[in-house]
Image (tube, rainbow, N blue to C red):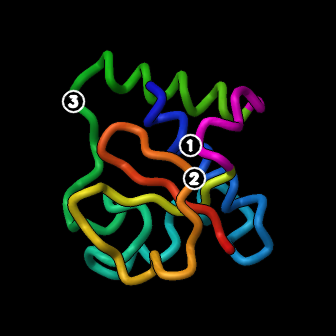
Amino acid sequence: INGQIAVAEVIINRADSPIFPDSICGVIKQGAQNLNRCQFSYKCDGEPEYMTERKAMKRAADVAILMMKGERRDISGKATHYHADYVTPYWIKGEIPTTTIGRHIFYKLV
């Protein structure tokens, strides 16, 4: 749950920033046309987007609803970026690490 909340915070933090699209959908879709080169890999991995596990789908929906209502917006340390700990993206230079949750490292803009 904490990881899902932190990713939701990244999305909202980006939508609140003047340098990213100003809507949640705009943030999520940004760069989606670039195969494996966007912030939210589920949007640009070339795989169809559907969930088959009902419990996971409900949990994701519950997190999204709570976050859009303004719940808990501090777990990621105001992060605007994140990545799995087994990759080293080109963009981490100049970013400030804020926290690690599970296998993901979160960053905010300098």
The residue where tag 1 is placed is: 8
Give percent across and percent down for residue 57. 36, 26
Residue 72 in the magenta stretch? The answer is: yes
Disc 2, SS? strand
The residue where tag 2 is placed is: 98
The quadrant holding residue 1 is top left
Tag 3: Cα neighbours inside 10 Å, few (<14), some, or many (≥20)?
few
Disc 1, SS? helix
Compute the Cα span from label 1 to label 2: 15 Å
Tag 2: Cα neighbours inside 10 Å, few (<14), some, or many (≥20)?
some
Compute the Cα span from label 2 to label 3: 32 Å
Counting residues from the start of the chain, the first of labels 1 and 2 encountered is 1
Nearer to the camera, 104 or 98: 98
Magenta region = 69-77
Nearer to the camera, 65 or 90: 90
Compute the Cα span from label 1 to label 3: 21 Å
Comparing marks 1 and 2, which lies closer to the viewer? 2
Taking the image as shown, residue 58 lies to the left or right of residue 8, namely left
Q: Which mark is residue 52?
A: 3
Give percent across and percent down for residue 84. 30, 56
Disc 3, SS? loop
Q: Image point 42% across, 39% down: which residue?
A: 101
Number of callouts: 3
